[in-house]
Image (spheres, rainbow, N blue to C red):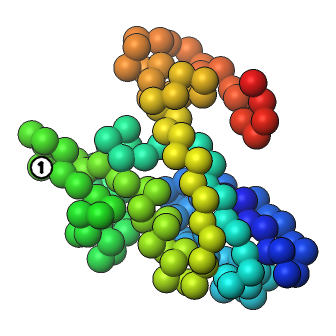
Amino acid sequence: LIYVDHANEAIAAVHAGWKGLVQGIHRVPFEKRLFDPKTTWVWVGPSLNGTSFETQADMWTQFGRAADDPKFFRPVAGSPTKRHFFAWDYIRHEFESLGVELIYNVEVDTLAAPAFNSYRRNTRAGATGPTPSNYCWIGFR
C-alpha cells in the first residue's frame, strides 16, 4: 500500500499481507494521525485476491465479523473449511470506513499474472526449491 497525503506532503509504503490486515497495519497511518484520510490517496499494488487467495479456517476466522461477510470471504466449492479471500474488497471497505475517498487499486493478481513470481503458482506447477524473487515491481519491466 502506498499512501500519499498531498496536503501534508507525506508519503508512506506499508506491506499489508493477511496477517498485517488482521492486526490493522493498514489503518495505522490514519489512527496515529500521520495521514489525513480526506487528503490521502491510497494505492493498492499487486497482490493475491479472490479465487487466487484460497484460505483455511485458521486464517479467515481471525478476521472476526468480516469472516462471515461474503463480500470478503466466499466458500470454496466442495470444501466447507476453505474460503476465498477478496482482499481488495476488504481493503477498500476498511479505507472507506476511515473516510479515505481516493483509493486506487491496480487490480493485478500476483498468482494470475506471470510477470510476478509466485510461490503458490510455482508449487502448483511442481517446482521445487526456492522461489525466485521480484526485485521491484514499481515501474520494472
Q: Position of residue 2 (x, y in %)?
A: 72, 59
Q: How many marks?
A: 1
Q: Is residue 96 above or below residue 59?
A: below
In this orientation, does residue 125 appear? yes
Does residue 40 appear to the left or right of 54 in the view shown? right
Residue 126 picture quarter:
top left
Give residue 104's position: percent from left, percent from top.
61, 59
| Residue at screen point 37% across, 38% down | 52
Q: Quadrant of residue 40?
A: bottom right
Please provide percent x and percent y for residue 97. Answer: 49, 83
> What residue sits right under mark 1 in the picture?
80
Could you tell me which secondary element the residue under label 1 belongs to? strand
Residue that protrudes farthest toward the left in the picture = 78
> What residue appears at the point 83 percent right and 74 percent down from the top-left corner?
6
Q: For mark 1, does the 10 Å Cα neighbourhood hold few (<14), some (14 to 19), or many (20 or more) residues?
A: few
Q: Amino acid at mark 1?
A: Pro
Q: Residue 57: horizontal and vertical position, in percent?
A: 26, 55
Which residue is found at the position 53% from the left and 35% from the top? Answer: 110
- Would residue 55 be visible to someone looking at this image? no
**Left or right: where 19 falls relative to 25:** left
Along the horizontal axis of the image, is 89 left or right of 129? left
1 up-or-down from 52: above or below: below
- Residue 88 is left or right of residue 73, and the answer is right
Q: Can you say which quadrant of the picture contains the C terminus? A: top right
Residue situated in front as seen by the camera: 66 or 6:
6
